[in-house]
Amino acid sequence: MRGPVAPPQVPLAASRAEAFADLVQDSVERLERRWPQLADIDFLVLEVPQFGAEERWNDEAVPLGGTFAAREGHRARVVVYRRPVEIRTKGRDERAALVHEVVVEQVADLLGLTPETVDPRYGED
């Protein structure tokens, strides 16, 4: 028998990448209630960080996210790197908490604020 194991409307049918993107979107929506200006920022999910040949990193220094300031023709961007986050978490709840932490930290960096200002519950999870 060929075909999907689960119908497309159930969470089981979502790929890991789609489920991760949903966690990022949930976090952004949570923050947009307090910070409406986030609607002007693009939030992206990339598999892993991309570095030039001159940049080096090790397992302890792999970034979980990054920011790109707005420039001519491009909106500001916040990026969350899926694989480094997944490797550091065991379950969906832990992953959701870490994704939210990364999003808060990157938004804070982009806005020039502290993470606690962006989300007063930062660090409580």
Image: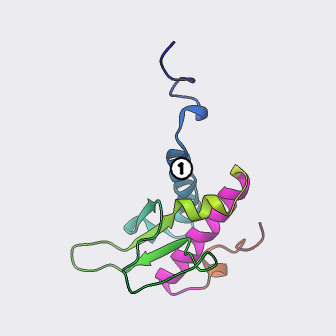
The number of callouts visible is 1
Q: Which residues are magenta?
A: 93-113
Residue 5 found in image quarter: top right
Image vertical order of residue 90 relative to residue 67, above or below: above
Q: Quadrant of the C terminus?
A: bottom right
Q: Position of residue 35 (x, y in %)?
A: 52, 70
Dominant secondary structure, magenta: helix
Q: In the image, residue 19 lies at what x, y percent?
A: 55, 46
**Disc 1 target residue:** 22
Q: Is residue 44 above or below residue 7?
A: below
**Rendering coords of residue 68 (x, y %):** 39, 78
Task: Give the left or right position of residue 46, taking residue 5 as reference.
Answer: left
Tell me which residue sits at (46%, 60%) in the image: 45
Secondary structure under the numbered disc 1 in the rendered image: helix
Image color mode: rainbow
Mark 1 residue type: Asp
Crowd class of label 1 (few under 14; some 14 to 19; many from 20; radius 10 Å): some
Q: Could you tell me which residue is drawn at 53 percent across and 23 percent down?
A: 7
Q: Position of residue 117 (x, y in %)?
A: 63, 81
Q: Residue furthest top?
A: 1
In the image, residue 125 sits, relative to residue 96, either above or below, namely below
As rendered, which of 24 and 54 lies closer to the eye?
Answer: 54
Q: Nearer the viewer, residue 87 or 113?
A: 87
Q: Residue at left 66%, top 64%? A: 98
**In this rendering, would 88 be left or right of 112?**
right
Judge whether residue 106 is colored magenta: yes
